[in-house]
Image: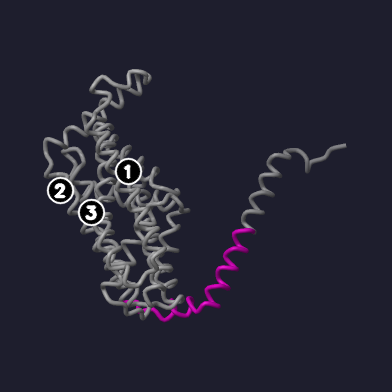
């Protein structure tokens, strides 16, 4: 007696699991849609100004251009801004697709390695680019927390101050470790030979920036410009939703939401930043519907930017295949 249905039970279980996940996702989307309608957020999005949304997308795109400039200031010589900007946009696709920034940073390292660059120097440039972006954010966070005491609760200000202090300590510790150069100085001999060799080359790459500190200053300037344009993107998205807050209040909300976004809690690029911006905007005078609509709009703009990176990779592969 043949039992065809049991020919491949593991595949059947996989299909059942897949359909179950799809049902859960559909139920979650239906619930989210119901909440959007009930809160008035959907109506706010429907009445948004298209012109302001386009302007917000332009500011978000310019912000990514500044982020690419931050990396260009630190990347190995011989790689122009246009190439690095394209790689950066394509890495943004991976940051949208895969939770966290590891996939995006790995893509950047592999992309330049494929162009003949030393992978240790590229890795050092990516790590420094991330670190200086965080330093730029912390430089804005201090004034934002100071001004925020006028509108935000003391508990929230203290919590954010603790997070900012922890990040400052982490950056300071990483800087001290880089200057200490433990492997080059003959320390950490217990490490495996391959790991010690890779760490030593990474230390040499970091050491090259000490000989040219102007590159670090330039990267920091690009980092400040990035956060400034990102703030403009939020302001324009808010104007599109009819939210007319003062620049001072936006200056509180956006950097502090970016500060919270340093926590590694996200899925497909969506995480605590979106919840934090809603919480902060409501505390600063926005309605929940307006704050939620702004958050959803900016997430949509970021996903659109990520998709443009995916399209860029697809086009380049098609062109190479045609050649």
Residue 48 appears in the picture as rendered: yes
Q: Residue at x 19, y 49 (%)?
A: 219
Indicate left or right for 29 with 308 as reference.
right
Number of callouts: 3
As drawn, 162 above or below 30: above
Q: Secondary structure at mark 2?
A: helix
| Residue 25, percent from left and from top | 59, 59
Looking at the rendered image, the quarter that the N terminus falls into is top right
Residue identifier under label 3: 223
As drawn, 56 above or below 179: below
Residue 170 got which mark?
A: 1
Residue identifier under label 2: 217
**Whole-Å distance between the Cαs marked 1 and 3?**
18 Å
- Confirm whether the magenta stretch covers residue 212: no
In the image, which residues are magenta? Answer: 24-51
User: Mark 2 or 3 closer to N-term?
Assistant: 2
Q: Secondary structure at mark 1?
A: helix
């Amino acid at each position: 007696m043949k039992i065809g249905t049991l020919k491949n039970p593991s595949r059947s279980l996989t299909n059942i699991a897949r359909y179950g996940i799809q049902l859960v996702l559909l139920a979650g989307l239906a619930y989210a849609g119901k909440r959007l309608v009930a809160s008035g957020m959907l109506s706010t999005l429907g009445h948004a100004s298209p012109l302001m949304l386009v302007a917000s997308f332009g500011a978000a795109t310019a912000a990514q251009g500044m982020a690419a400039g931050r990396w260009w200031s630190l990347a190995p010589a011989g790689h122009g801004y246009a190439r690095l900007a394209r790689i950066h946009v394509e890495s943004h696709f991976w940051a949208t697709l895969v939770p966290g920034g590891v996939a995006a940073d790995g893509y950047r390292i592999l992309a330049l390695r494929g162009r003949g660059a030393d992978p240790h120097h590229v890795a050092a440039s990516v790590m420094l680019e991330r670190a200086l972006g965080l330093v730029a954010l912390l430089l804005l966070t201090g004034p934002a927390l100071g001004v925020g005491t006028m509108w935000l609760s003391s508990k929230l200000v203290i919590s954010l101050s603790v997070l900012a202090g922890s990040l400052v300590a982490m950056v300071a510790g990483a800087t001290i470790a880089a200057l200490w150069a433990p492997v080059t100085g003959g320390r950490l001999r217990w490490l495996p030979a391959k790991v010690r060799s890779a760490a030593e080359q990474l230390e040499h790459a970091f050491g090259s920036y000490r000989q040219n500190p102007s590159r670090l200053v330039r990267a920091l300037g690009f980092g400040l410009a990035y956060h400034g344009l990102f703030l403009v993107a939020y302001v324009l998205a808010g104007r599109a939703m009819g939210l007319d807050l003062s620049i001072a209040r936006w200056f509180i909300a956006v950097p502090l939401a970016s500060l919270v976004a340093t926590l590694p809690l996200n899925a497909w690029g969506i995480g605590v930043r979106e919840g934090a911006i809603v919480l902060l905007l409501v505390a600063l005078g926005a309605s929940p519907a307006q704050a939620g609509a702004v958050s959803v709009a900016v997430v949509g703009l970021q996903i659109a930017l990520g998709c443009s990176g995916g399209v860029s990779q697809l086009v380049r592969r098609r062109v190479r295949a045609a050649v």
